[in-house]
Amino acid sequence: MNHNTAGQLRIFPSTGDLTADNKLFTNSYIVGGGWTTSSYPRIITGDFNGDGRTDIMNHNTAGQLRIFPSTGDLTADNKLFTNSYIVGGGWTTSSYPRIITGDFNGDGRTDIMNHNTAGQLRIFPSTGDLTADNKLFTNSYIVGGGWTTSSYPRIITGDFNGDGRTDIMNHNTAGQLRIFPSTGDLTADNKLFTNSYIVGGGWTTSAFPRIITGDFNGDGRTDIMNHNTAGQLRIFPSTGDLTADNKLFTNSYIVGGGWTISSFPRLF
């Protein structure tokens, strides 16, 4: 989906055909308009109702969250998102510098986590109910504290141990990586992340301007890739072992070079 300066959203459905150039995206459809960056500083995606389709959520300058559930219909313009529902309010960028998504309890639905200026993490598990306003997120739980942006410049998510639940990793100013595996327990405060493990060190933002995640080898676990200032890409495949420090990433492999920020401003 692209998003132009006028705020128009246009989706290019995949054909699945990667046998030659320009076969993967052959059609496109308008699915929204007026979503300017000045009016909507954040656009967030996820399968919030657990129906297997990706929905979108916009976040306006007043901090209101509104979700547009996907109908799955990409046969013509403006058929994909036909309804919308308010699911939160007061989440201003000044009060909540980060909004993080993931399936933290492993129920197949995307949950959201806000991160306030004091560094508190609070998760709102999805009920899956998008039939009316304010039914999707009805409870919330504190799951961490002290994660200020000044102390932890990065918070990264992924299913690092392959158990079907989203874990979180913080990255401090010294470049240490620490993962908090999800227990799946969202019944009360501070039950979701009860243990943590160091999984790397020296990954400072000055030395490694980017950290990228993905299941690069297809084993169901999230791997990480660092990108240094020389443009070298190095992948650390996950072993799935989160029983002690420094067991999750034990090997690494160079997978690319010359991808400098000046030449390649984005990596996905």
Image (cartoon, helix red, strand yellow):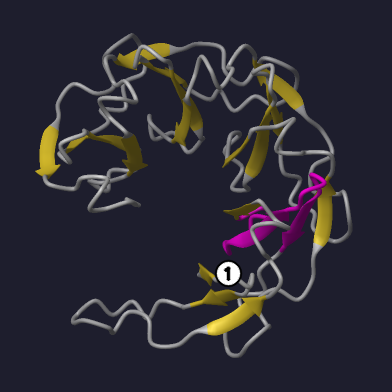
Q: In which quarter of the image is residue 56?
A: bottom right
Residue drawn at x 63%, y 61% as measured from the top left: 55
Viewer can see residue 221: no
- What residue lies at 66% left-to-right and 34% top-to-bottom? 113
The residue sitting at the front extreme is 262
Hey, what amino acid is under mark 1?
Thr
Q: Is residue 57 shown in magenta? A: yes
Is 81 displayed left or right of 247 in the figure? right
Residue found at x 26% / y 15%:
202
What is the quadrant of residue 149 in the picture? top right
Q: Give the range drawn in magenta.
A: 47-68
Question: Residue 164 versus residue 248: which sits nearer the camera?
Answer: 248
Residue marked by disc 1: 5
- Compared with residue 88, is residue 116 higher up or lower down, i.e. above or below? above
Question: Which residue is nearer to you in this view: 264 or 90?
Answer: 264
Would residue 92 appear left or right of 131 to someone viewing this image? left
Percent coordinates x, y for residue 242 in the rendering: 36, 18
- From the top left corner, tell me how far across and down residue 268 is, in percent: 35, 52
Residue count near mark 1 (Cα–Cα under 10 Å), binned few <14, some 14–19, many ≥20: few
> What SS does tag 1 mark?
loop
Q: Looking at the image, which is closer to me, 77 or 250?
A: 77
The reply to whether residue 154 is in sight is yes
**Quadrant of residue 226 in the image?**
top left
